[in-house]
Image: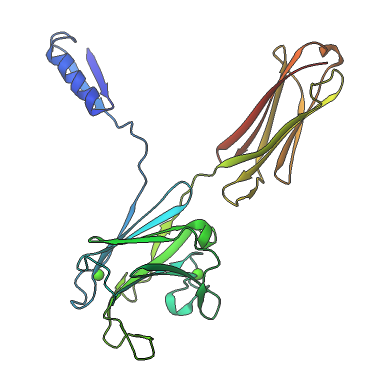
Amino acid sequence: MTRIFYASTLFGAMSLVAAVDSGMFGERDERRILFTSNNAPAPEITQSFVDSTGEDPNAPDITGINVSNTDGGLITFHVAISNRPTLTSDMTVLLWLDTDANPATGDPQSLGAEYVIEVDPGVVSLFKWDGTTYQSAPAATTVTYGYDATGATVRVGIQDLGGTKLINFGADAISGITTDASGNADFTNAHDDLAPDANHGFYNYSVITKLTLKQTAFAYTPKPAKAGARETATLAATESDTSGPVANATVTCVATIKGVRLRATHSLAGGVASCFWKVPKTAKGKTLIGKITITLKGTTLAHGFTTKIH
Ligand SMILES: [Ca+2]
Ligand SMILES: [Ca+2]
């Protein structure tokens, strides 16, 4: 006989060992297989991009960039800098973002970047390419930064990056910037480190988000339902993809009277899903149980109702 043991946590494995040791599974006279797994929620997936090290001893040294994003599309870039434990006043860290993953659009000098994030001591700024130059981005509410001994951390939501799904990106860490007599930045003695290295293109990152649906209204009419009349239920929703009315979704309508399902038709227009059922004339005094469901890319939103038929 073969016995298969299964443990999905460390505690489970310890308990199992204790049980085996104390003889609760009998003498060890058969084949035993321990099958382990991890039932922890899927961790945020971080992608690591490696940079060369020690390129310029006088420059900050980027060793790599880790990127991850939340289900809602907040992206975190961690630019690891090995030799600058603090962001000093002569430093700037830049992140170029080609947010349509198309080098032919955006800044031709920067491999087609649509956006640049600039981290200076005390301030982080988001700039957008306007076809000629970079301007302050119209929205930058999600942009934050931090700097510690491991380097710079920049967070930005896809809503401030035109809803990007695929980003080509690179970073530049600069030191030795001074200010000239007229207050302009002077890069004469500046040193920098590019990641990826010059002429190595950009890194690529896919933003994988989970779509959410949000109910904005629900109603059914007539209320209460009427024997022999058409019953209508409407469910209005917005989708996180576009932050607008739900579109191109599947609408499912289920209504039963004493367990018998009614025939239904449905529609979806202007972010409002509608279900229509014909209530039999003979249904007076019975109860109608209805439910309208919107499904989009594996995400569902449903609303049920119960009404006594008059
Ligand atoms: Ca480097
Ligand atoms: Ca581009």
Provide residue 78's location: percent of width, then percent of height: 32, 59
The quadrant in which residue 293 appears is top right
In this rendering, position of residue 143 left or right of residue 211: left
Which residue is pictured at 18% across the width and 23% down the height? Answer: 14
Tell me if I can see residue 165 in this picture: no
Q: If the picture is divided into quarters, which one holds ligand 1?
A: bottom left
Provide residue 92's location: percent of width, then percent of height: 33, 73
Which residue is pictured at 85% across the width and 12% down the height? Answer: 282
Which residue is pictured at 62% across the width and 31% down the height? Answer: 302
In this rendering, position of residue 200 left or right of residue 131: left
Q: Is residue 23 above or below residue 6?
A: above
**For the view shown, which residue lies furthest in the bottom direction?**
181
Tell me if I can see residue 310 in this picture: yes
In this rendering, position of residue 64 left or right of residue 134: left
Along the line of sight, the residue nearer the viewer: 251 or 236? 236
The quadrant in which residue 278 appears is top right
Along the line of sight, the residue nearer the viewer: 36 or 159? 159
Q: Is residue 65 above or below residue 115?
A: above
Which residue is pictured at 60% across the width and 46% down the height? Answer: 239
